[in-house]
Amino acid sequence: MSGRPHILGERSLGRSDKALPEVAVLPWGATEPHNLHLPFGTDTFQAEAVAAEASRMASERGARVIVLPAIPIGANAQQLSTPLTLNLHPSTQARVLADILESLEHHEVRKLLVLNGHGGNDFKQIVRELQPSFDVFICCSNWWSVLDASAYFDDPGDHAGELETSVMLYLRPELVLGLDEAGSGAARRFRLSGLREGVAWAPRDWASVTSDTGVGDPSAATEAKGQQFFGDVCRTLADFLVDLSGADVTDLYETDGSDI
């Protein structure tokens, strides 16, 4: 049985359809604890699954999309105090992404979506720096923020809370411990009101914020909630991939017929 043709790691060179993809999707996750009940690979599993399903949907509608192998290590410098967390500094992530772009450009794949699965990853500034050097259009998305999670969950949470636990109960239930084994996900806030309210931002020292590595209560999580949210996110991303596959990236901006 042949693999899924829209997943590069499962694709064979001998496939009869040898047309190059228009769009590559790069899932990028992390390796870190997720409360006491979710696996270390949660961010990577979720990003991979969303990339695969959204690309399958888009491919069935004629989009030429390929999912690249996931990067399973994220920017986790502030989480290194938690057991077995792995870290790639943003500067290292930029070098990895540049090498991937160089390969895509060589093979004339001209569009890339970086599909992020980890809150500590932030690709915007990396894309700003790399875009002028490559003839590949680069865009990025945080899969969990594609839709308003509050419409699906009582309290989505920030890390290993209701949202992530529900999605993992749907995707990989065999890797999720019982919710009775999960920590509360209670988190300590910054003392400075400006940092709490978004006047300013600073990275959180994870060991000072949470005792179980979770931020958000997972107790209301269900497989059904995860399935609904996952499906709707994938359909939304599939719409984007169809549009991106057919887009002329040299003509991305609307005009109203007047000079600017």
Image (cartoon, grey):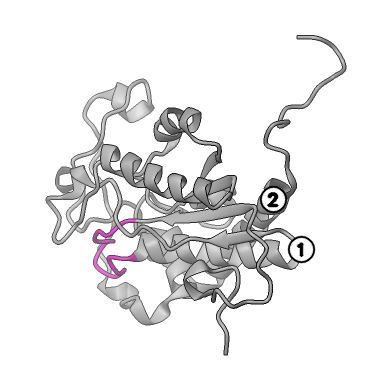
Residue 189, percent across and down? 25, 37
**Which quadrant of the rendered structure holds the C terminus?**
top right
Q: Which residue is mark 1?
A: 61
Any part of residue 72 in sight = yes
Q: Quadrant of residue 162?
A: bottom left
Residue 69, percent across and down? 43, 63
From the viewer's perspective, is 11 left or right of 196? right
Nearer to the camera, 209 or 83 = 83
Residue 38, percent across and down? 31, 68
Element under disc 1: loop
Region rendered in magenta = 30-41
Residue 81, percent across and down? 12, 50
- Who's the residue at 54% across and 53% down the image? 107
Whether 196 is drawn above or below 221: the answer is above
- Residue 239: mark: none
- Who's the residue at 33% across and 73% down the image? 179
Dot placed on the residue nearer the N-terminal end, 1 or 2: 1
As shown in the figure, which amino acid type bears the numbered disc 1? Arg
Q: Residue furthest right?
A: 257
Q: Which residue is mark 2?
A: 245
Element under disc 2: helix
**Which quadrant of the rendered structure holds the N terminus?**
bottom right
